[in-house]
């Protein structure tokens, strides 16, 4: 059922798990210091037990209470981008009760979300809130309350409806603890070039995970519909699979000759436009909704036409999600 922020905070403080909106995707939320509630998240999502949860905070001062130090580079990026779609790896202090959310790790991934409803809930709780994406593990991340309800609606007592997510792609995860370099552990809305503008003299390493910590979204197959998905390089390759579906950009769709479109129709191939490359933001915003829609077509297989999404933050993030969806 749909609930307001007061009801949401009450449920969280009583150990329940609910769905909340963020600017990126909807989250499956529990108080991060409550081990029983954290266990419910893993059970509801069927999430691997070694896959840590991002913890969400109201402000920088709330983060400070749980970590050893706030490194200078991290602090600079927080001041520039938070609240917003960026998450930071930090070291927990010795007494931190967040180790249930981090699967026993000494590090936590912390974020200050940029959504008024979620921030209000965190403030009302007075505690950090763990909130991975509100979907069955490995499946498509939800960007609306309706998508949450379709997947997990019978498993949770409430959903806070914040409308369609404004970004639609998960946060960038960075490790900015070192003084001379920053590692981007998961690509997202904020890209390396934007970080470089804030810290121009710092080396930025993309996909540079060099430690034992499993970053959310880094090891397991993610973001996928039930329908198997693969990538093809040439559009005609799909003709070998009658009755399938093909995701492609509007530009690619418009480049197909009209007489060729008849062949796709005869082969019962569903052509699904993900939008125009002239508006990467719109592609990202509707990406997961379109991906999940393929399951309603009841096709045996779906394909992505290989696409150059560009070297922007969202372009790299979209390419990462396509690779993950197709098992790459």
Image: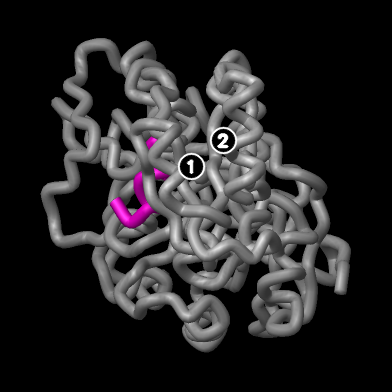
Specify start and end residues of the magenta stretch as a single range.
319-328
Report x, y in % for residue 113.
60, 44
- Measuring 79% from the left and 74% from the top, which residue is drawn there? 158
Tell me if label 2 and label 1 are in contact, CB under 8 Å.
Answer: yes
- Measuring 44% from the left and 55% from the top, which residue is drawn there? 229
Q: Any magenta on residue 231? A: no
Q: Is residue 2 visible?
A: yes
Report x, y in % for residue 255.
56, 17
Report x, y in % for residue 228.
45, 62
Disc on res. 79: none
* Residue lying furthest bottom: 36
The residue singled out by tag 2 in the image is 84
Foreground residue, 266 or 114? 266
Disc on res. 171: 1
Q: Residue 253 sits in which quadrant?
A: top right
Q: Secondary structure at mark 2?
A: loop
Report x, y in % for residue 180.
14, 26
Q: Is residue 128 visible?
A: no
Q: Any magenta on residue 322? A: yes
Task: Work out whether 119 lies above or below 135.
Answer: above
């Amino acid at each position: 059922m749909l609930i307001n922020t007061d009801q949401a905070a009450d449920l969280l403080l009583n150990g329940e798990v609910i769905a909340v909106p963020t600017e990126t995707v909807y989250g499956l939320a529990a108080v991060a210091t409550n081990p029983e509630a954290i266990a419910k998240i893993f059970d509801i999502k069927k999430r691997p037990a070694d896959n840590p949860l991002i913890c969400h905070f109201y402000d920088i001062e709330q983060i400070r209470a749980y970590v050893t130090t706030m490194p200078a580079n991290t602090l600079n990026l927080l001041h520039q981008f938070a609240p917003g779609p960026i998450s930071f790896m930090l070291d927990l202090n010795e007494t931190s009760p967040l180790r249930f959310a981090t699967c026993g790790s000494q590090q936590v991934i912390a974020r200050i979300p940029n959504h008024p409803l979620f921030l209000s809930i965190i403030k009302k709780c007075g505690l950090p809130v763990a909130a991975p994406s509100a979907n069955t593990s490995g499946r498509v991340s939800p960007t609306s309350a309706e998508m949450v309800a379709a997947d997990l609606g019978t498993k949770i007592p409430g959903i806070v409806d914040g409308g369609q997510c404004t970004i639609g792609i998960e946060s960038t995860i960075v490790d900015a603890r070192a003084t001379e370099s920053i590692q981007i552990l998961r690509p997202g809305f904020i890209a390396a070039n934007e970080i470089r503008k804030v810290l121009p003299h710092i080396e930025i390493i993309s996909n540079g995970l060099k430690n034992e910590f499993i970053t959310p979204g880094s090891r397991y197959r993610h973001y996928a519909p039930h329908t198997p998905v693969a990538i093809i390089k040439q559009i005609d390759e799909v003709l070998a699979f009658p009755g399938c579906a093909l995701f492609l950009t509007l530009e690619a769709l418009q480049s197909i000759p009209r007489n060729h479109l008849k062949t796709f129709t005869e082969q019962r191939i569903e052509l699904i436009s993900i939008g125009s490359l002239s508006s990467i933001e719109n592609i990202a915003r509707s990406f997961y909704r379109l991906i999940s829609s393929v399951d309603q077509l009841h096709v045996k297989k779906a394909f992505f036409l290989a696409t150059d999404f560009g070297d922007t933050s969202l372009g790299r993030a979209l390419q990462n999600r396509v690779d993950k969806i197709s098992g790459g």
